[in-house]
Image (spheres, rainbow, N blue to C red):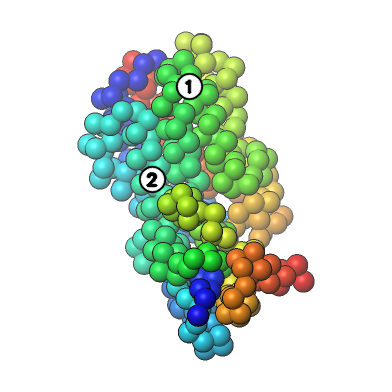
């Protein structure tokens, strides 16, 4: 797996378009256990990312990540802005002195740690971390394997389904207590959408 | 007159933020700088890091700024806004763990007396310790 600048630009485009396309589904999930704005918030954030696509594509990878992070922070308008924003800002920071693909797990891990710190949350609390942490484990264990992309896709899909029976203890869904059980977490779902889009785009470019 | 701690009110709703600021002004007067913001970047319910940064700068004082927030996203976005301030200002801003209306009034009352940022925060947070 290599990551050339043009590859990266098309990755960002595909991922942003997928998030925008999934906005109605994310909003429906958030109406069940949150305040119903996750889809529109993510759509607004990733439309802003798309509007800066040329600039992002022209930047070194670490700067491009930071631009994406800052854009999400400034435009999403819900808690997911700082959460996703912190992921990209921290991953960008890590990329300044790491290399892809060999340090992918470390770079991804920096992003996941930033999300955890920003949300003061851990895996198991029915949040996006319930997708990000299992994917990080897969990257750590299988980084060298030829089928790592497929394994990430499977991990993310299985992880998002596992959030349904969880009881939320963080975020807006925690107000619902037991009533949050039975619904997939919207943040976990949007993380899954992003990861699936990146994987599909990487597979298509191989 | 010596400077007093500034108060920033961050709600998902601009109406709530404005109403809270109105109450603070009526009950505490104009000696404390109060700034408020509410709404997402499209003007709907939500919070907006860029507006929060502006509000912090509007309420800026040499003694620092105390932020009062309503629900989760307002807190997360306020913390993010603080991290995006100039380095020397970051340590002089706190996000109070207190109910927004009562917290803002109590914090502003304490600030009006010339108290430090830590004292202002402590008085607001006593409300949640209840």
Camera-nearest label, 2 or 1: 2
Q: Nearer the viewer, residue A16 or A81?
A: A81
Label 2 lies in what chain?
Answer: A
Across and down, in percent, residue A23 comes to: 40, 49
Residue at image position (53%, 31%) is: A110
Q: Are marks 2 and 1 on the same chain?
A: yes
Across and down, in percent, residue B98 comes to: 64, 68
Residue denoted by label 2: A70
Mark found first going from the N terminus, 2 or 1: 2
Residue A143 visible here: yes
Label 1 lies in what chain?
Answer: A
Q: In this view, does A89 lie to the left or right of A141?
A: left
Across and down, in percent, residue B49 comes to: 42, 57
Is label 2 in a helix, a strand or a loop? Answer: helix
Q: Which of B4 and B13 is in front in this view?
A: B4
Badge 1: how crowded within 10 Å, few (<14), some, or many (20+)?
some
Q: Nearer the viewer, residue A185 or A65?
A: A65
- Residue at far front of view: B1
Residue at image position (47%, 10%) is: A146
Residue at image position (48%, 68%) is: B61
Snapshot quadrant of residue B66: bottom right
Q: Is residue A115 left or right of residue A17?
A: right
Residue denoted by label 1: A104
Q: How many marks?
A: 2
**Viewport quadrant of the C terminus of chain B:** bottom right
Snapshot quadrant of residue A85: top left
Residue B13 visible here: no
Query: Is residue A163 depicted above or below A148 in this figure?
Result: below
Query: Is residue B97 depicted above or below A88 in this figure?
Result: below
Is label 1 in a helix, a strand or a loop? Answer: helix
Snapshot quadrant of residue B101: bottom right
Across and down, in percent, residue A43 comes to: 37, 50
């Amino acid at each position: 797996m290599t990551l050339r600048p043009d590859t990266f630009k098309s990755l960002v485009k595909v991922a942003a378009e997928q998030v925008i396309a999934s906005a109605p589904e994310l909003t429906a999930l958030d109406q069940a256990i949150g305040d119903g704005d996750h889809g529109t918030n993510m759509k607004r954030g990733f439309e802003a990312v798309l509007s800066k696509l040329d600039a992002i594509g022209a930047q070194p990878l670490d700067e491009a990540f930071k631009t994406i992070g800052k854009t999400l922070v400034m435009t999403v308008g819900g808690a997911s802005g700082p959460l996703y924003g912190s992921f990209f800002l921290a991953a960008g920071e890590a990329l300044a002195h790491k290399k892809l693909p060999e340090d992918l797990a470390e770079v991804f891990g920096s992003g996941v740690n930033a999300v955890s710190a920003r949300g003061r949350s851990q895996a198991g609390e029915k949040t996006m971390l319930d997708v990000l942490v299992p994917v990080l484990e897969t990257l750590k264990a299988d980084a060298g394997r030829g089928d790592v992309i497929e394994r990430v896709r499977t991990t993310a899909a299985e992880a998002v389904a596992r959030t349904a029976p969880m009881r939320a203890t963080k975020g807006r869904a925690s107000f619902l207590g037991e009533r949050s059980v039975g619904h997939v977490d919207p943040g976990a779902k949007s993380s899954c959408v992003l990861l699936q889009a990146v994987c599909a785009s990487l597979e298509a470019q191989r | 007159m010596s400077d007093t701690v500034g108060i920033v009110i961050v709600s998902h709703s601009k109406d709530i933020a404005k109403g809270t600021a109105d109450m603070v002004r009526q009950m505490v007067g104009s000696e404390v700088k109060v700034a408020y913001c509410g709404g997402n970047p499209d003007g709907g319910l939500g919070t907006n890091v860029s507006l929060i940064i502006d509000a912090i700068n509007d309420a800026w004082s040499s003694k620092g700024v105390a932020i009062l927030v309503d629900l989760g996203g307002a807190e997360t976005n306020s913390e993010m806004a603080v991290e995006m301030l100039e380095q020397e200002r970051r340590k002089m801003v706190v996000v109070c763990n207190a109910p927004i209306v009562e917290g803002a009034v109590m914090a502003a009352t304490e600030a009006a007396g010339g108290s430090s940022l830590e004292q202002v925060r402590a008085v607001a947070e006593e409300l949640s310790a209840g």
